[in-house]
């Protein structure tokens, strides 16, 4: 049901003359044959159009929560992130018009697979190849991406755990180098990721990865 609603949102935006895609979690999980309710949308439509077409509940950092038929969807405008502050958030963002530029700001290649309004997969950065190889690679420079946003270190461990994937060697080096930044994340963000790792059927794999990167203290904290 959510998929059909998401497709209807994409079609409404496309009929207005813009692009829109389902990106990240749902396309990745569908490709792997997994059930998913992880729907994120992206578009080059202006914010004013979104507010005309949909009920917008909240907007931050060019990302809105819209309500369609009682279902909430996050929709983000195509953008390029500027310099990050506090190893977590970009200080400024720049809106862009093309999908590939938007995808290049994202964390891992496996999360760049998209679905368009026609229900077709759009793979600009090789997500399907990485999914086939069951490997997690960073989009762009691994060292830069881990330093920019320390949460990506825990997200990498979470995806490797939940999907039972391998971490790319360059990603592993960057995670080890910047692992100390994880302590600067809020307790809430830490606990959310650890809960997903603990709740996975591959939880022991996640525990081993936390030990590998000297983050086992997260596992034992209340």
Image (cartoon, rainbow, N blue to C red):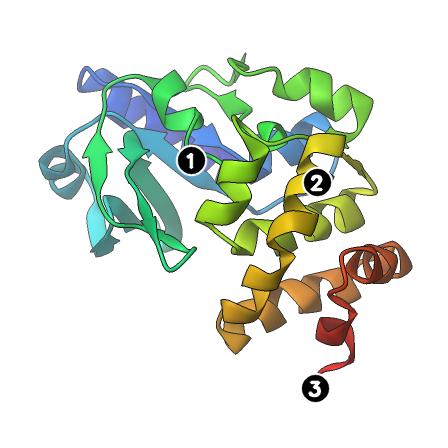
Residue 77 image point, x, y percent:
27, 34
Q: Of the residues under marks 3 and 1, which one precedes in the sequence?
A: 1
Asked whether the residues under the numbered discs 2 and 1 touch, taking CB atoms below 8 Å apart as contact, a structural biologist would say no
Q: Quadrant of the C terminus?
A: bottom right
Residue 201 image point, x, y percent:
86, 57
183 to 145, vertically: above or below: below
Task: Indicate the secondary structure of the residue bearing disc 2.
Answer: helix
Residue 172 image point, x, y percent:
73, 41
Closer to the camera in the image, 123 or 210: 210
Tell me what residue is drawn at x 48 percent, y 73 percent: 186
Tell me what residue is drawn at x 55 percent, y 24 percent: 113
5 to 66, vertically: above or below: above
Q: Is residue 85 visible?
A: yes
Which residue lies under the disc numbered 2? 173
The local crowd at label 3, few if under 14, some if 14 to 19, many if 20 or more residues have their Cα within 10 Å, is few
Separation of marks 3 and 2 at Cα, in angstroms: 28 Å
The local crowd at label 2, few if under 14, some if 14 to 19, many if 20 or more residues have their Cα within 10 Å, is some
Asked whether the residues under the numbered discs 3 and 2 touch, taking CB atoms below 8 Å apart as contact, a structural biologist would say no
Residue 59 image point, x, y percent:
22, 53
Quadrant of the image occupied by residue 169: top right
Q: Of the residues under marks 2 and 1, which one precedes in the sequence?
A: 1
Quadrant of the image occupied by residue 154: bottom right
Which residue lies under the disc numbered 1? 6
- Left of 134 or right of it: where is 145? left
Which residue lies under the disc numbered 3? 222
- Left of 146 or right of it: where is 88? left
- Left of 64 or right of it: where is 5? right
């Amino acid at each position: 049901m959510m998929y059909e609603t998401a497709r209807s949102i994409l079609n409404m935006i496309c009929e207005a003359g813009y692009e829109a895609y389902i990106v990240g979690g749902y396309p990745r999980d569908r490709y792997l044959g997994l059930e998913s309710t992880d729907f994120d949308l992206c578009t080059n439509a202006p914010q004013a159009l979104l507010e005309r077409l949909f009920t917008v509940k909240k907007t931050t950092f060019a990302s809105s929560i819209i309500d369609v038929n009682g279902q909430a969807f996050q929709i983000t405008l195509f953008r390029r992130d500027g310099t990050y502050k506090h190893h977590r958030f970009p200080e400024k963002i720049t809106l862009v018009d093309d999908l590939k530029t938007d995808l290049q700001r994202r964390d891992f290649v496996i999360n760049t697979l998209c679905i368009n309004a026609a229900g077709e997969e759009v793979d600009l950065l090789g997500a399907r190849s990485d999914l086939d190889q069951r490997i997690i690679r960073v989009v762009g420079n691994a060292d830069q991406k881990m330093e920019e946003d320390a949460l990506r270190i825990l997200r990498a461990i979470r995806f490797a755990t939940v999907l039972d994937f391998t971490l790319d060697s360059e990603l592993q080096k960057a995670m080890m180098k910047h692992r100390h930044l994880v302590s600067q994340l809020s307790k809430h963000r830490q606990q959310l990721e650890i809960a997903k790792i603990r709740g996975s059927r591959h939880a022991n794999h996640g525990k081993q990865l936390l030990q590998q990167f000297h983050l086992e203290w997260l596992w034992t904290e209340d």
